[in-house]
Amino acid sequence: MAASLSHASYSATFISSASKVTVSQPSRFSPSFKASTFSPLTAKPLNSTFTPHARRAVTTIMHATSTPSSIPSDTSTKTFHGLCYVVGDNIDTDQIIPAEYLTLVPSNPAEYEKLGSYALIGLPSSYATRFIEPNESKTKYSIVIGGANFGCGSSREHAPVALGAAGAKAVVAESYARIFFRNSVATGEVYPLESEVRICEECRTGDVVTIELGESRLINHTTGKEYKLKPIGDAGPVIEAGGIFAYARKTGMIPSR
Amino acid sequence: MASSLVSPSPIPSFIGNKKSLGSSAFPATSQIAIQKCKKQVSKKIVSVMAPQQSERKPATTGSVKTGMTMTEKILARASEKPQLTPGDNVWVNVDILMTHDVCGPGSIGIFKKEFGENAKVWDREKVVIIPDHYIFTSDERANRNVDILRDFCTEQNIKYFYDIKDLGNFKANPDYKGVCHVALAQEGHCRPGEVLLGTDSHTCTAGAFGQFATGIGNTDAGFVLGTGKLLLKVPPTLRFVMDGEMPPYLLAKDLILQIIGEISVAGATYKSMEFVGTTVESLNMEERMTLCNMVVEAGGKNGVVPADSTTFKYLEDKTSLPYEPVYSDAQASFLSEYRFDISKLEPLVAKPHSPDNRALARECKDVKIDRVYIGSCTGGKTEDFLAAAKLFLASGKKVKVPTFLVPATQKVWLDLYTLPVPGSGGKTMSQIFEEAGCDTPASPSCGACLGGPKDTYARMNEPKVCVSTTNRNFPGRMGHKEGQIYLASPYTAAASALTGYVTDPREFLQ
């Protein structure tokens, strides 16, 4: 599990400028439970070597396994490039995937695809340009740009799954609701990235953007503007591996199948 | 590895400490954070609140044990650690994992895929499976999903599976309960001091019992099914102190709408909400459940109410498992404290389309409505129906709009038909509802709170205006995207049904 929150990977931007930064050393973790198929990550540095596997159509450039530095998440050359789809604040899970589609089971491959075809179908009609065209089942927008509290509402994992199944690679929002964020990482379906300013007010649906994960940067080619993103930190390797289970296998936390 | 973060930091990590301010929050920090979220909050009722204060956490020098909040203590015990601080990531032993028909099949799919087709759950007595969302429908996939649950429970010999087979007559199913969060409480699965996780955002409801309860997704649930553990980050706690006698026209729903309206739908993101004070102590268990139920609507991770004699009495005939309540230390650190003078509060609604779009019910009296919905884990419990019945009784009149009643569980349904309503001369709630012209109480389930399949009873299939005792009113929540949902207490819902407009219950209850 990506448990260690190493301080080294933060950008030096804090909400409060008044705070002192004191970070204690990661404590040694000793497990005491007895689940037989599970052994936790014991004091293993998160820069362990593993080769990222290609996930669906994500452009993954093989990067060197990281140096034994204290930077845990080495997604230095990962980029996303494509059209962006812009939404507002408080996009709740009912708008991302309306409840009537929750009879579709995400772990069923055919139903997973169907879920994708309904991604963001719950957005009001004020969104004239739809995320997925009426007769399509995939989106042409690989990046969703949102405002505050993206993904609020239900705990339904169908929400990040629908976005990922539709073809979205990343969401860049001002802030997230916690269950949606957690689900995005656990499933590895989309990268839940955070912007530092309200880029949802400066980007338009259809703008061409590039996200450089390692640089924590978003470039809007249509407007020519660049934006700093908050580093994805320890969530990066988990999503890149394909979610918590895949990550746990890669890092030897649970046995390979 | 668990690392202890003492500073506020915007770390994006999958553990999820999004904008946690850490426990050394300075007033400036919390002000900034609150400002960010305060976009649409009405500033009308601030007079009832004392300005929030933040408490600085005393310096930790390692060997000195600092006080912990209830949530910190529960997680400390569950992770077998003597001391925890907000921001710590810890492996927590799970006491109960709950799932239902919407998320269960997905969680089971992940469990089997990751742990093997023949894997066994970590503890057949700690997994509680409660079909409740899409039950009374002819939707084939929805019906299939209940079958998937049944097959799994049979194969795993799950002890608590509240099954339903005869969809035409819920009473013909002795095991079937209904809405999961109410069933968990009624069947004695909620116990002080424990950790309860569920694949539903309103799992936080169980915090009313003084336990840590929160919602998780299918993947996390699949992980818990196999291991009985989950990696959680310890949230800092916001404390809400409510003192004073509860006025006869207010219910717990009004209290939580007040709070959400104050701090916004993201005001408690990644935080715990602790509810204390004499008013809270005066609430019965179901009212406390309503309070904790909507913690998630403020973005909260979990809500807690300290266990007391009311809790113990409720649990007496429901569970025989031992439990050990925990309480916040006197010297525990809270991120902020909010104080309310209950006597100054008035009945509220949350206007479309957000649970934090707070308004006084009396200021919405010109809003014409098309229907009223009384149901869900938030407002479909016995106490909720009792409240509605009392108001109908006091008025003696008939409703002017279709009024849908959806009891949360079989037990609630039975109460409607058997419990005498105080002051009615022995009438039952069902009789009072019938006399008032309400619809016949429906089969117990989540019903139209979240829309559901198109044939769900009381689903909003056309754009209508509805006053509802449910928990969310985002666009499309009850079905139609242009539907307008006013969230309200059962008193306010009943009053509105009688006039055909959003109505302050004091019109009938003084």
Image (spheres, helix red, strand yellow):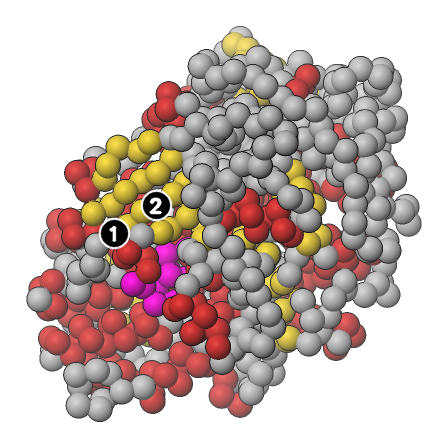
Q: Residue B46: which quarter of the image?
A: top left
**Cβ atoms at labels 2 and 1 below 8 Å apart:** no
In this rendered view, identify the residue nearer to me: B324 or B202: B324
In space, the residues marked 2 and 1 are separated at their CA atoms by 10 Å
Q: In the figure, B391 relative to B298: above or below?
A: below
Query: Is residue B307 shown above or below B432?
Result: above
Label 1: how many Cα within 10 Å (few below 14, some 14–19, many 20+)? some
Q: Is residue B205 visible?
A: no
Host chain of mark 2: B
Q: Residue at x 84, y 42 (%)?
A: A253
Q: Position of residue B41 (x, y in %)?
A: 28, 36
Identified by mark 1, the residue type is Asp
Q: Which mark is residue B240?
A: 2
Of B423 and A176, which appears nearest the observer?
B423
In the figure, residue B378 lies in which quadrant?
bottom left
Regarding residue B242, the answer to whether it shows in the image is yes
Residue lying furthest top: A224
**Local secondary structure at mark 1:** strand
Q: Magenta segment, principal secondary structure?
A: helix
Left or right placement of residue B69 versus residue B15 in this view:
left
Q: Position of residue A94 (x, y in %)?
A: 47, 49
* Camera-side mark, 2 or 1: 1
Q: Residue A89, image x and y in percent?
A: 41, 34
